[in-house]
Image (tube, rainbow, N blue to C red):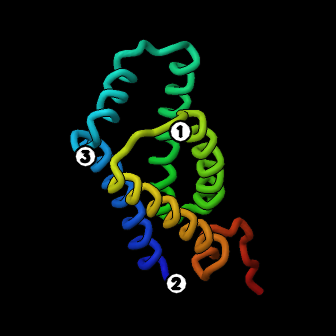
Amino acid sequence: MNAKTFRVLLSIEIILVILSVVADISLEKHLPPILQDYLTAELENEFTTFELIFLGLALITLLYIIINYIQLFMLARSARIHATIVTFLSYPLAIGLGPNVTHETSSLLYDTSTVFWGFLLGVMYFSDIKVYFDNKVEEED
């Protein structure tokens, strides 16, 4: 795999994530009425201190994800380890958010982007593209 193919695959991943968020917001009105009522009730509740701290951590992680996408596009040497770290940071945050009510299309896009991200992690570690992310510098004779 070459750098151009990797960047195309990374672009597909970013598009899937963006489509997932857009679908989540735009398809909310197509949920069954009981789920819409649940979402409305959740929005009316005030944030607890734990939720505010959690939201702050989530926003910091989101910023880290955006920076990591830029690093990956630039094929920065540290990008692969940052991608691994951001993965390990993101999933505990997702678990801590609790139940999530979304439309099935949004869920499909999110799950697809998650699998695609796993594929990209594998590509970064086990394909020819790994030479861009290896910290070892080859010595020339």
Q: Residue at x 61, y 61 (%)?
A: 80
Q: Secondary structure at mark 1?
A: helix
* Three-letter code for the amino acid on which mark 2 is drawn: Met
Asked whether the residues under the numbered discs 3 and 2 touch, taking CB atoms below 8 Å apart as contact, a structural biologist would say: no
Q: Which residue is mark 3?
A: 27
The residue wearing badge 1 is: 61
**Which amino acid, mark 3?**
Leu
122 with respect to 7 (left or right): right
Is residue 65 placed above or below 1 in the rendered structure? above
Using the numbered discs, state the Cα–Cα distance from disc 1 to disc 2 in whole angstroms.
Answer: 29 Å
Q: Position of residue 96 (x, y in %)?
A: 59, 34
Label ID, residue 1: 2
For discs 3 and 1, the disc positioned in front in the rendered view: 3
x and y, in percent, of residue 9 in the image:
43, 72
Q: CA distance from mark 3 to mark 2?
A: 37 Å
- Establish if 94 lies above or below 137: above
- 138 lies above or below 97: below
Badge number at residue 85: none
From the image, state whether disc 1 or disc 2 is nearer to you. 1
Please provide percent x and percent y for residue 40.
31, 24
Q: CA distance from mark 3 to mark 1?
A: 25 Å
SS at mark 3 in the image: loop
At mark 2, the secondary structure is: loop
